[in-house]
Amino acid sequence: MSMSTSELKEIARKCRVEIVKMVYRAQAGHPGGSLSEIDLISALYGNYLRVKPNEPNWDDRDRFILSKGHASPGMYAILAEMGFISKEDLESYRVLGGICQGHVDMKWCPGVDFSAGSLGMGLSFGMGCAIAGRLSGSERNIFVMLGDGEIQEGSIWEAAMAAKHHELGNLKVILDRNRIQNDDFCVTQMRMFDIPAKWQSFGWDVMEIDGHDMDDVVRGLDFLVNNNDNPAILIANTIKGKGVSFMEDNPAFHGAAPNDEQFKLAMNELGEVMS
Amino acid sequence: MSRMAATRDGYGQALLDLASNQKVVVLEADLGKSTKSLHFRKEYPERTVSCGIGEQNMLLTAAGLASSGYIPFASTFAIFTERAFEQMRNGVARPNLAVHLCGSHGGTHTGTDGSSAQSIEDLAIFRTLPNVIVLHPSDDVSTRVLTNQLAEMNQPSYTRTARNKTPVLYDGREEEVIIGKGITLKEGNDVAIIACGVMVSEAMKAAEQLAENGVAATVVDMHTIKPLDVQLVHKLAQSCGAIVTAEDHNIIGGLGGAVSEYLSSNIPIPLERVGVNDRFGESGQADEMLELMEISSPYIAEAALRAINRKK
Ligand SMILES: Cc1ncc(C[n+]2csc(CCOP(=O)(O)OP(=O)(O)O)c2C)c(N)n1
């Protein structure tokens, strides 16, 4: 029973509200990359990922590996939306003892499959999960979300080469191509030229979409799940900070929290009625 | 109240001080805003090399620059310097190339980013590399002075700085800060507390708490972990007869490790090591982390009493 694109959009909107609230409450964290990834994550959890919120450690679940683990508010928001964790748990983001650690951590939070925070590690980890799935005769899929800054790490390309060598058709990457990294725009920090061509030359199947157009996102995720012979990557063109005007395409909101006034404005823009 | 500042700001300042030397080159791995090399980048873009998010590449690029007569200063978070550890070992330390690596946001004090960002092993691992100087200054002034001195050294270095502000200790006392020389901040004959980084001001607080109970403690800022100021350690062992080390780092292998290695071979006396007790951190505010890890000033004071008791 799959959700319509308008239902998925509403999930994403609600997640955006929670993302901004989390970062505002903590006065720390990473809103930009959480807001750029959230349409993709909402559709993935809404219609594709085979997981059981009441049985987060179900052996044969699909895996979702948020390799860009700083964008954790996006993941916590969807985990709460799907019922892996509660809405109250979101208040523990970056709070001592809270399950919502600064970076997603499989030791702390149900539904998290990878302890992230150091960039460039999730694809190799996903490869291990993909080989394990194959060894155990399972059809499960392994999804790995990467950032475009993150793919500057050499280890990403070690994994890309190896995944093709091992013909891991159950390994599926979503690239959040928001064109901004920590200090600045990617073009300033490290020009990456033709990203689709790079993955193609490593033997991957590649599709490019608009990561905020829900119809396009659904087409892209269909492509990933129906492509089981070859490792595949969905390159989603996104806008960092999408949905909050002053955060959009603004490197300053990679890792910064809104102040009181900005918070109200953001809630307003996201259609959240404040008491 | 004394001035508060973060050691990483001292690093940023030092790079500007050094800029008049045309051989100084700065390397970044997309964390210049955080490590504070951004000030240099803004003023001297032509002598700043952006390596993207690629720490391993950064370290060996720095090695190549050093082999060609340049003086490279490379920085990232302390934790991500570890990603390039083997590059540092084989490509920098082994040929003894004067690459200066700075890891900011070291220790659990770095706070709510959580365990993935809290390096608690950097001092230990870099200390095991021959030729490498290891520094962990306690305030922005000493960080600035020490970083300036590094440019004169013909060997590689690793400097850990911290993210958050702590009390400034050396305004107007710049000439006391010398690589390889511990600084005695307070003198007392019952016990010596040897600390580094953010723990130096905790050690000063502990000494005050001890003084209230009639215990006189020496406090030393051991900003250079390697080469360790063994003359000073020896002297303290003789004059106090008991030592406490304090660091925001695993108790294995860091300052405590260095001091215990010296003492056990040369002048065995009671030593208590205050540090992260071989566990990972988690998300929390800087002060909450020092509590959770049981390394804040009361824990140092307790350790001092334990060390003194063991003298008998
Ligand atoms: C190995 C490593 N180096 C540096 C960092 C610090 N860091 C955190 S986020 C970030 C930028 C990430 O950019 P991108 O992958 O594009 O993520 P997004 O824009 O989606 O947030 C950096 C450099 C890190 N987490 N890991």
Image (tube, rainbow, N blue to C red):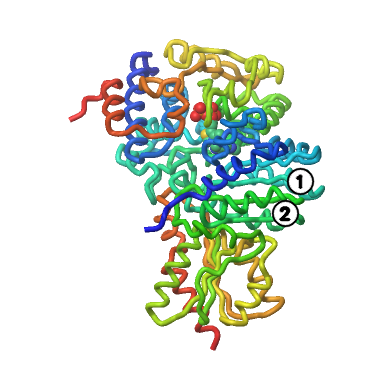
Q: Residue at x 72, y 54 (%)?
A: B132
Tally of numbered discs: 2
Q: Is mark 1 within 8 Å of ligand 1?
A: no
Q: Is mark 2 within 8 Å of ligand 1?
A: no
**Structural distance between the alpha carbons of marks 2 and 1:** 9 Å
**Residue B204, which numbered label?**
none
Chain letter behind tag 1 = B
Instruction: Name the quadrant of the C terminus of chain A.
Output: top left
Q: Quadrant of residue A253?
A: top left
Instruction: Name the quadrant of the N terminus of chain A.
Output: top left
Amino acid beneath label 1: Val
SS at mark 1?
A: helix
Chain letter behind tag 2 = B
Q: Quadrant of ligand 1?
A: top right
Relative depth, front residue between A195 and A64 = A195
Relative depth, front residue between A228 and A86 = A86
Q: Is residue B58 left or right of residue A44?
A: right
SS at mark 2?
A: loop
The residue pinned by badge 1 equals B92
The residue pinned by badge 2 equals B132
Q: Position of residue B252 (x, y in %)?
A: 61, 63
Amino acid beneath label 2: Val
Q: Position of residue B207 (x, y in %)?
A: 45, 72
